[in-house]
Image: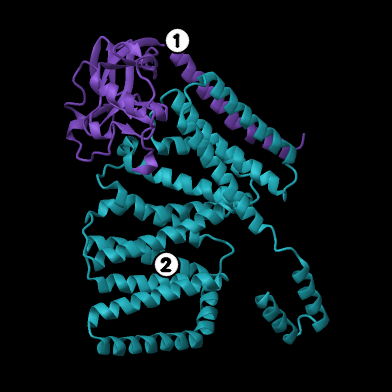
């Protein structure tokens, strides 16, 4: 509400709205209920807990109940949930619709577990997850919220990563013993390719948002892991072959970024720079076994560019968090480099001055640079 | 019916139909397949019981995964397709071919072991400890139902001393520790 009041004052001062209109908006917003996002969060939590509870019940394996009865009850419950959703299907904003959808989708997962238990199936968890994700995709795509698409996307990425690391079928295309390292490097790039491809489908907006979450979460985590591995001087594969699938996906992502019709040149350049930095950093850190100063430079560049991206896309909290982490890395770098507090202090003051100087320079050249780039593009 | 309603109907029926099909396929294999008895043993007594299922090594009566593609693999997570032919009994890499083998258990070699998806038997929690003991102490077998090549195999029952486990083992008065308590 404080944020809204501040914005309203700005808009009144700018002459966009009158003072009585600002008062009316403030009164209207104050009278509105908190919104159902909080309620939905609890509903998502509740349906998730019920799903886990059902899976645990199945795990208890009540052998006194005949297999046929267990299966019949399971299908009866699924049919009941399906029938409930069918009746609510057109009430797009109803929370009960979303709850029934979530329970049905999680119920399908529990059913796969039950069938596996009754027939003593011994498949891997990733195979069961991909099977579940395939049969429930149409249902999840009917969701009007982010919870189920996020859960679905996370499950698919986890299962695909595991499958890529252990499946014998990959040998047909690419034989390499250290697939886990390759998988971790490729995960954010795969998410980027998926998000860029899905952006062309407005109906898949929730899936796109989920993949975007994994680009940043996965990418920044792996950058941090690579950096810490250099700080601790840990060893990893020095074979360039490990990075080939990721580099291929990176190329696809680059083409996707370049061909985005609604992105400005500046945004494309920013995203392209981030991608190139990521593609360069991980192999250089591991293959080159470079000094941790080099990895720190990459971290500063990547986190800084990501903070700019979040700032430009109006996610100020994320931007601030990244800048805070950046500050932490700076501190660590100087403490490790100089050891003593006096020298560290001088180093940090110089770094701070450098950052402020770069900001001043950016403010001076931003507009002319953007105009020049747009002229170049046209 | 509107396009949206049709989409909802398809989304609801697809998982139900596929899950029902899966049950039907497993049940058909269980009912109509050839019953085969295979001896089992725990390959690591400390890890015989994992959660609520028994894991074991199956003795197929022939040497498995000894030489060939799997033996040269340095990565223990890698799987190489293979099968156990039951008639005539032998081990072979690749998927089974009906002309050379009428009844086969398909699977793969991994870390020198043949895995057919039959190495797990789900059990009730209160039977976990006594069953683990019984499998160690007595002659344990699994009863497997196998359909003709290319075929599929499903575990039908666990036999202790030639009898179904339910007839041999009594529940533990104090259930074993759950997975979460380890």
* Residue located beneath label 1 in the image: B32
- Please state which of residues A229 and A120 is positioned toward the viewer in this rendering: A120
Asked which secondary structure carries label 2, the reply is helix
From what the image shows, is residue A346 above or below residue A161? below
> So how many labels did they put on this image?
2
Quadrant of res B147 = top left
Who's the residue at 45% across and 10% down the image? B32
x, y (%) of residue A243? 30, 54
The circle on residue A159 is none
Whether residue A254 is visible here, answered yes or no, is: no
Q: Residue furthest right?
A: A20
Which chain is purple in the picture? B
Task: Name the mark nearer the viewer: 2 or 1.
Answer: 1
- Please state which of residues A195 and B153 is positioned toward the viewer in this rendering: B153
* Residue located beneath label 2 in the image: A274
Which chain is cyan in the picture? A
* Pointers 2 and 1 in contact (C-beta within 8 Å): no
From what the image shows, is residue A240 above or below residue A17? above
Q: Is residue B43 left or right of residue B8?
A: left
Whether residue B123 is visible here, answered yes or no, is: yes
Asked which secondary structure carries label 1, the reply is helix
Q: Residues within 10 Å of mark 1 (few under 14, many from 20)?
A: few
């Amino acid at each position: 509400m404080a944020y809204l009041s501040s914005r309203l004052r700005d808009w009144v001062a700018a002459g966009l709205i009158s003072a009585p209109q600002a008062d009316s908006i403030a009164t209207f917003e104050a009278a509105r209920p908190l919104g159902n996002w909080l309620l939905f969060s609890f509903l998502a939590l509740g349906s998730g807990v019920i799903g886990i509870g059902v899976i645990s019940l199945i795990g208890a394996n009540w052998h006194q109940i005949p297999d046929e009865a267990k299966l019949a009850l399971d299908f009866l419950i699924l049919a009941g949930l399906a029938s409930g959703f069918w009746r609510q299907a057109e009430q797009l904003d109803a929370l009960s619709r979303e709850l029934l959808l979530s329970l049905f989708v999680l119920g399908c997962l529990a059913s796969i577990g039950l069938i596996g238990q009754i027939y003593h199936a011994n498949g891997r968890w990733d195979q069961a997850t991909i099977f579940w994700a395939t049969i429930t995709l149409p249902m999840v795509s009917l969701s009007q919220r982010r919870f189920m698409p996020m859960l679905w996307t996370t499950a698919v990425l986890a299962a695909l990563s595991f499958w890529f690391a252990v499946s014998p079928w990959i040998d047909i295309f690419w034989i390499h013993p250290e697939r886990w390292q390759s998988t971790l490097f490729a995960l954010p790039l795969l998410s980027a390719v998926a998000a860029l491809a899905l952006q062309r489908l407005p109906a898949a907006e929730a899936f796109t948002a989920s993949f975007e979450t994994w680009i940043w979460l996965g990418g920044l985590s792996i950058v941090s892991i690579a950096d810490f591995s250099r700080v601790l001087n840990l060893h990893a594969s020095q074979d360039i072959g490990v990075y080939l699938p990721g580099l291929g996906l990176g190329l696809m992502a680059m083409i996707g970024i370049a061909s985005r019709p609604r992105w400005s040149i500046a945004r494309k350049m920013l995203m392209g720079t981030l991608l190139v930095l990521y593609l360069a950093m991980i192999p250089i850190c591991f293959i080159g076994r470079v000094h941790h100063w080099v990895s720190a430079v990459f971290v500063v560049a990547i986190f800084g560019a990501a903070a700019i991206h979040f700032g430009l896309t109006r996610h100020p909290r994320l931007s601030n968090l990244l800048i805070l982490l950046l500050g932490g890395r700076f501190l660590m770098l100087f403490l490790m480099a100089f050891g003593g507090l006096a020298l560290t202090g001088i180093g940090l003051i110089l770094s701070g001055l450098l950052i402020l100087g770069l900001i001043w320079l950016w403010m001076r050249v931003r507009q002319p640079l953007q105009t020049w780039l747009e002229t170049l593009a046209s | 019916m509107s396009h949206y309603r049709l989409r909802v109907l398809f989304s609801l029926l697809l998982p139900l139909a596929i899950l029902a099909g899966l049950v039907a396929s497993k049940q058909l294999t269980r009912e109509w397949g050839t019953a085969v008895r295979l001896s089992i043993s725990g390959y690591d007594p400390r890890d015989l019981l994992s959660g609520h299922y028994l894991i074991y090594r199956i003795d197929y009566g022939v040497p498995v995964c000894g030489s060939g593609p799997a033996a040269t693999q340095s990565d223990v997570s890698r799987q190489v397709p293979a099968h156990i032919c039951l008639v005539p009994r032998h081990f072979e890499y690749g998927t089974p071919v009906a002309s050379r083998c009428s009844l086969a258990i398909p699977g793969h070699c991994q870390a020198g072991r043949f895995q057919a998806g039959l190495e797990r038997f789900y059990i009730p929690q209160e039977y976990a400890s006594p069953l683990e003991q019984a499998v160690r102490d007595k002659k344990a077998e699994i009863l497997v139902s196998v359909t003709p090549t290319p075929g599929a195999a499903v575990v039908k029952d666990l036999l202790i001393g030639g009898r179904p486990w339910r007839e041999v083992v009594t529940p533990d008065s104090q259930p074993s520790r759950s997975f979460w308590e380890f």
